[in-house]
Amino acid sequence: MPLPAEKTELEDSPIPVGKAASPWGNATFRSVALAAALVAVAILLLLVWQLVSDSLPTLRAFGLKLLASEDWNAGAEEYGALPFIYGTVVTSAIALVLAVPLSIFTAVYLTDLAPVWIRQPLVSLIEMLAAVPSVIWGLWGIFVLVPWLRTAVFPALRAVLGPIPGVGSLFSGPIFGLGYLSAGIIVAVMIVPIVTAVSREILRSVPNLQREAAYALGATRWEVTRIAVLSYARRGLLGAAVLGLGRALGETMAVTMVIGNSPQISASLFAPGYTLASVIANEFGEAGADRMYTSALFELGLILLVITVVVNVGALLLVRAATTKGGSRFA
Amino acid sequence: MNPPLGSPEPRTYSEPMRPPQPAVGQSPQPVRQIAISVEGLNLWYGKNQALFDVSLGFPARSVTAIIGPSGCGKSTLLRTLNRMHEVTPGTRMTGRVRLFGDDLYRSGMDPTILRRRVGMIFQKSNPFPTLSVRENVLVGLRLNGVRDKEVLRERLEECLRMAALWDEVKDNLNRPGISLSGGQQQRLCIARAIAMRPEVLLMDEPSSALDPIATARIEELVHELKETFTIVIVTHNMQQAARVSDHTAFMYLGRLIEMGTTQKIFQRPEHRQTEEYITGRFG
């Protein structure tokens, strides 16, 4: 009878032991996972290598002169990156000036002031802003925002701020509609969701005990926000702003559609300009087989990559330092 | 039975704080004035009732300890005394709390003004990390618009001395408040609270995060501060209640079980639950 035999077998091994694991399965799994992880690193390294090697012709021919020159004329083999760097910096700066205060106030409202039931719907709405494709913002910018800015907002700005010495030069000169300020405003709208989301995380990491300390001293809500929340979170909020800057620097599509695409440097924010990302997007087709032209565009790409990597790494370090618990951040 | 209630003399920001002088012909065991009286207090967090019909009085210029096992409502009761529970969304309360006769929950009572009269010390020290020692002490006065440099300077020294911290920090008042040790930080928070010249100091387990030496210093300080302030201290440490308080209230499951002089509560409690708790049979 087979049954007793089976029984004794079970008794001999009270803990059921399955088939011994094949050493190959584990090793295969490990190497597949490792390879997947390495792919990302390899792509990044290849990308940087490609950018550098394709920039070499202009790097060799012009050296750092390319960074300092204002003239961009591919036909005459003049490649000056300055108008693009200027345009990138100016549009990003406008975007930050507009978006950061808006985002921080939104985040304060969402964490400390809004009724609890309204918080989640508002957060979802703001997240949906982030999901709108860049080209849609560009279309909206061209057909809705820019005409309104040109006819209503910019003339008023010029009338009010134009006469002020110093600041006035930013708000003087002819109004085209397309230009730095229009691009900056579009980028501001586009970075509000990310800056708000990160600011909200930062504010949520402020211990309640800090708020209670301020309340217990007879602080009003605004005073609690000021002395206990914003002050505590200031480094993290700076990180959120820098993260927004990282996004603003690389924003391409919508900016290309509303900045006017003119390689010049103008003091007036109403003037049309150009950014690093926009010129690459617009001109790589024209560059075609022209080795120096292509190389110049690659070099612009390299400049943009270096700036955005530095900014993003800085932002990550700031945000991480602020959201990690522990007293060391203020020591 | 409550003794007649009266408003305290109004304080101004320039007069120095000093302990009350005994009146001539005062009896050796004066009937203490009640600083805060609580009448029929019920409190809910959402649907959960946390306090059930609590009534008691906290005698002025003495220390009253509230003891009881975790979750008995002692911290909640403390927070109703300066309306701090209102900061938590979803709380509802019925009953009355009076500060020297003045109804804390009457319409027109501004909680921010009230909290200047009833200061609070928390379980964990919470100095403002971006402010220096000096700014931490003076932040409440600045919120109140006190700008006079001379007043601020005097108040700084006075409060740090009262909080037994002056000698340790006087040479470096500009260092960050959180660079101090844990015990020093808690005394800094006490200095910050008394800079407002409150009438009452509420302490929510003020030494539970401190080592025994720092705890002893806080207890010493409580003993000194009761000359000037009415103190209500919540503690889960019965030895601490016995050491620092004049009166003790024992709470259990959201109800006040028994209140009396500390001596009586610890030596001859009337209720079985009180006795079981203080002898360590539950809690």
Image (cartoon, coloured by chain):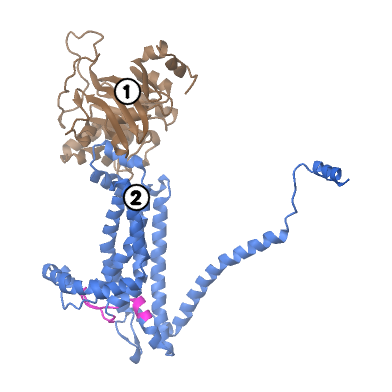
Chain colours: A blue, B brown
Residue at 25% in and 30% down: B118
Mark 2 belongs to which amino acid? Leu
- Quadrant for residue A247, please give it: bottom left
Q: Quadrant of the N terminus of chain A?
A: top right
Label 2, secondary structure: give it: helix
Residue A242 is at least partly visible in this image: no
> Relative to B13, is A306 above or below?
below
Measured Cα–Cα span from mark 1 to mark 2: 37 Å
* Numbered range of the magenta stretch: A261-281
Q: Nearer the viewer, mark 1 or mark 2?
A: 1
Mark 1 belongs to which amino acid? Asp
A24 vs B21, left or right, is right
Label 1, secondary structure: give it: strand
**Residue A220, horizontal then vertical, whole percent:** 23, 42
**Residue A34, horizontal then vertical, whole percent:** 60, 64
The label on residue B53 is 1
Badge 2, how many Cα within 10 Å: few under 14, some, many 20+? Answer: many
Chain letter belonging to callout 1: B
Badge 1, how many Cα within 10 Å: few under 14, some, many 20+? Answer: some
- Quadrant for residue B15, please give it: top left
**A168 or A193, which is in the foreground?**
A193
Was residue B168 drawn as part of the magenta stretch in this picture?
no
Chain letter belonging to callout 2: A
**B188 or A133, which is in the foreground?**
A133
Was residue A262 drawn as part of the magenta stretch in this picture?
yes
Asked if labels 1 and 2 share a chain, the reply is no
- The residue that label 2 is drawn on is A203
**A4 or B70, which is in the foreground?**
A4
A314 vs B154, left or right, is right
**Residue B69, horizontal then vertical, whole percent:** 43, 25
